[in-house]
Amino acid sequence: MSRVAAPLAVSDGQRQILESLAHSQVAAHRMVQRARVLLSAADGVSNSEISEVAEVSRSTVLAWRGQFEKDGLTGFGEVAKGRGRKPSISDEKVAEIVELTQHSKPKDATHWSCRSMARHTGSARRRCNGSGRRVGSSPTW
């Protein structure tokens, strides 16, 4: 027989924010889903029932509850460090590509192309494309 978890302690201000997120049509789906899970937990619904209704694992419900109990709404919806795809090109190489793009021209050309930049820096062409986006610049090639 499983134990029923105590209702999650949520202040009136936090509940208002969570309800706003839970009913949002423009917030990211994962944030809406998480807000609904936390509101259900605050209403005293069992973790197993929440996981079935929200279509997430019970361990996810427990993790979200634990994080909310620890941090409240601080960092709500942020992706933890170390998650996601790692950059395939170093920051130094990106800086070199951006510097060359902004302050120099290739020989016998008016501007850098992806292919000429890749040849010059020894990078793959597709890596040069995203370099400007990583630093908030938009190369013109």
Image (tube, rainbow, N blue to C red):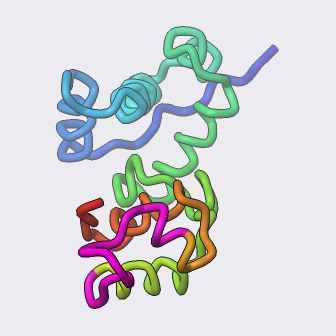
Which residue is located at x 20 percent, y 42 percent?
12
Q: Nearer the viewer, residue 33 or 136?
A: 136
Q: Is residue 103 left or right of residue 92?
A: left
* Residue 99 vertical position relative to residue 46 in the rendered view, above or below: below
Question: Residues in magenta?
Answer: 102-118
Q: Is residue 46 above or below residue 126?
A: above
Question: Which quadrant of the figure has residue 26?
Answer: top left
Residue 88: image quadrant is bottom right
| Residue 8 point in image, percent of width and height | 45, 37
Q: Residue farthest to the front? A: 108
State the residue in front, 85 or 75.
85
Camera-nearest residue between 60 and 123: 123
Residue 51 vs residue 79, the one in the foreground: 79
Q: Looking at the image, is 58 positioned above or below residue 101?
A: above
Direction from residue 105 to residue 123 in the image, left or right: right
Question: Considering the image in quadrants, where does the N terminus appear?
Answer: top right
Residue 116 pos. (x, y %):
46, 69
Which image quadrant: the C terminus?
Answer: bottom left
State the image coordinates of residue 64 (x, y, percent, origin top left): 54, 41
